[in-house]
Image (cartoon, helix red, strand yellow):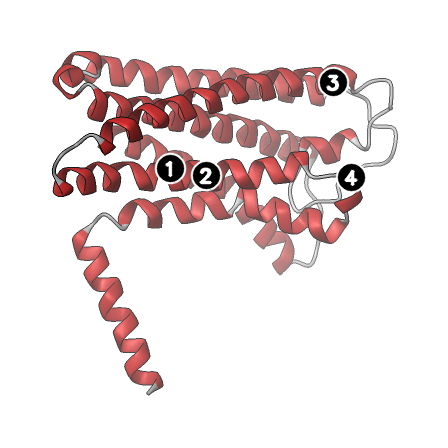
Amino acid sequence: MYFFLLNLSLLDLGSVSTTVPKSMANSLWDTRAISYLGCAAQVFFFFFLFPTEYSLLTVMAYDRFVAICKPLHYGILLDSRSCVQMAAAAWASGFLNALLHTANTFSIPLCQGNTVDQFFCEIPQILKLSCADCYLREVRLLVVSACLGFGCFIFIVLSYVQIFTAVLRIPSEQGRHKAFSMCLPHLAVVSLFLSTGIFAYLKPPSLSSPALDLVVAVLYSVVPPAVNPLIYSMRNKELKEALKKLVQLVLFQQQ
C-alpha cells in the first residue's frame, strides 16, 4: 500500500507542477503568454500524469480487494515484483497516452488564432482553434481513452462491491472498522478525481462559459492532487492529533 502511495504522491506533485507554476508566473507578470513548446509540454505532462494516476488508483483498488477478500494470498498475488510491474504498467500506459494525444493534437493546423481560453493548455480548448475538418481524429482518440477509462471505472466498482460484501461479513466491529479505514481514503480520492473530471468534460454545452470553464478546470486539475495527501494523511494518528489541537487553538482564540 505504501509503495503505491509513494507513486501517487509523485504523480500528485507532478500534476500540480504542470499547470500551477506557469499560471502563477503569468499572474505575477500580468501576461497570458506561453511558448508553443511550453504549451506542448503542458499537454504532454497533463495527459501523462493524470491518466497514470487513474491507472494507479485502479491498481490500488485491486490491492484493497486482495488485502480484504483474499488476505491469505496477498503475499503471493502482490509480492514486490508484482507491485513494481503494475506500477510500471500504469506509468507506461500514461506515457503512451500522452505521446499519442500530444503528437496528434499538435499536428492539427490552427485556423482560428493562437489564444487558448484557459489558464493552461487544454486539448478541448486547443481543438476550438483548429479547422473543423481536422480535429476528428483527435476526438476519436479521446473517445478511445474515455472507453478505456470507463473500463477502469467498472473494475473499481466491481472491486468495491466485493470488498464491501466481504467487510459486512466480518464478525468483529474492530475488524470492520479497520477494513473501512483502509478503503475509505482511496474511495474518497477516486470519487473526487472522477467527479471533477466527468463534470469538466461531460457537462452540457449550455452550461459552458469562460468563467465556469475556468472554475471547473481548477477543480479537476488542481484540487484533487492538492487534497489527496490530506485525505490519506488523516489515517495518521499524529496528524489527526495535530489537526485537533490546531482547531481547538483557533476556536479558543475566537472566544
What label does residue 12 carry, if any?
none
Distance, label 1 to label 4, CA atoms, is 29 Å
Q: Is residue 89 left or right of residue 198?
A: left
Task: Decide which of tag 1 and tag 4 comes sooner along the chain.
Answer: 1
Query: What's the amino acid at mark 3?
Result: Ser
Distance, label 2 to label 1, CA atoms, is 6 Å
Distance, label 2 to label 3, CA atoms, is 34 Å
Residue 203, percent across and down?
A: 69, 39
Residue that mark 4 sits on: 205
Q: Secondary structure at mark 1?
A: helix
Q: Residue at x 63, y 57 (%)?
A: 27
Query: What's the amino acid at mark 4?
Result: Pro
Task: Decide which of tag 3 and tag 1 comes sooner along the chain.
Answer: 3
Can residue 234 be seen? yes
Q: Quadrant of residue 68?
A: top left
Residue that mark 3 sits on: 107
Q: Quadrant of residue 41?
A: top right
Tag 3 near tag 1, CB within 8 Å: no
Classify the position of the N terminus by image quarter. top left
Above or below 240: residue 39 = above
Distance, label 3 to label 1, CA atoms, is 38 Å
Tag 1 near tag 4, CB within 8 Å: no
Query: Can you tell which of label 2 and label 3 is closer to the viewer?
Result: 2
Residue that mark 1 sits on: 187
Residue that mark 2 sits on: 191
Q: Is residue 157 left or right of residue 240?
A: right
Task: Decide which of tag 3 and tag 4 comes sooner along the chain.
Answer: 3
